[in-house]
Image (cartoon, rainbow, N blue to C red):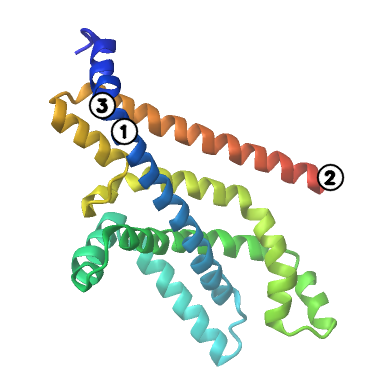
Amino acid sequence: MFDQFFERVYDQFIAGDGLEMLKTGLGGTLLLALSALVLGIVLGTVFAVMKVIPGNTVVGKICNTVATVYITVIRGIPLVVLLLLGYFGIFGPRGWNEMPVGILIFGINSSAYVAEIMRSGIQAVDKGQMEAGRSLGLPYRASMVKIVLPQAIKNILPALGNEFIVLIKETSVAGFISIFELTRAGRAIVSKHYDAFVPYLVLALVYLVLVLIATGLVHLLERWLAKSDNR
């Protein structure tokens, strides 16, 4: 297994086209993860706000129920099942390409988790902030958008960074619907060179480096936020 290891790496990734495959797969992984994170943040924020709306009115009760059902259902179904259902059962037969479907499904899946993160961030903001906005004559929506949400988002930025890390690793299942991401690139190299050890080891190292870089960026963000809070 370990015989002539570096020679095998050279043959597959330098002399061969393994490096180009990995670069293409890396682009697919980052595009999928970043786009899904943006979509997840948008949808997650909407459902988080729906979940924290006071339930003392009919509209509030409906919003609470819809948000709770959405979050429960999406979090209760495995991502792979959502991906297969979305591509082969709903969007694929209508002519959608695999990448838009992947972004949509990954974004929907992420939004259920972001919604809970955002909800906790909103509830962590002192209730006096909302009351202050209402006392100034702002309606509930304006108080939420202009006063509460900016503070909540600042509080949960590190958690959103961790969600991005999770998304990077979760994209490894996107190959089930033929998206060419890192894991599928690794499988393509294995099938071409009939060598599983070297490509998968390199693939694991690439994922590790990506996660370490993302983790470092999250830590930098946390330190920056801590400094800004101390000013």
Which amino acid does the dot numbered 2 rest on? Asn
Q: Nearer the viewer, mark 3 or mark 1?
A: 1
Q: Position of residue 97 (x, y in %)?
A: 27, 62
Which residue of the protein is positioned furthest toward the bottom in this rendering? 58
Instruction: Report crowding for label 1: few under 14, some 14 to 19, many 20 or more residues within 10 A (C-alpha).
Output: few
Residue holding disc 3: 199
Residue closest to the eye, 123 or 33: 33
Q: Is residue 181 left or right of residue 225?
A: left
Q: Are marks 2 and 3 in contact (CB under 8 Å)?
A: no
Residue holding disc 1: 20
The residue depicted at 58 percent of the width and 65 percent of the height is 119
The residue depicted at 75 percent of the width and 43 percent of the height is 226
The residue depicted at 52 percent of the width and 64 percent of the height is 115
Q: Position of residue 96 (x, y in %)?
A: 26, 67
- Numbered circle sitting on residue 178: none
Q: Quadrant of residue 205?
A: top left
Q: Quadrant of the N terminus?
A: top left
The numbered mark, 2 or 1, whose residue comes first in the sequence reads 1
Q: Position of residue 78 (x, y in %)?
A: 30, 57
Which amino acid does the dot numbered 1 rest on? Glu
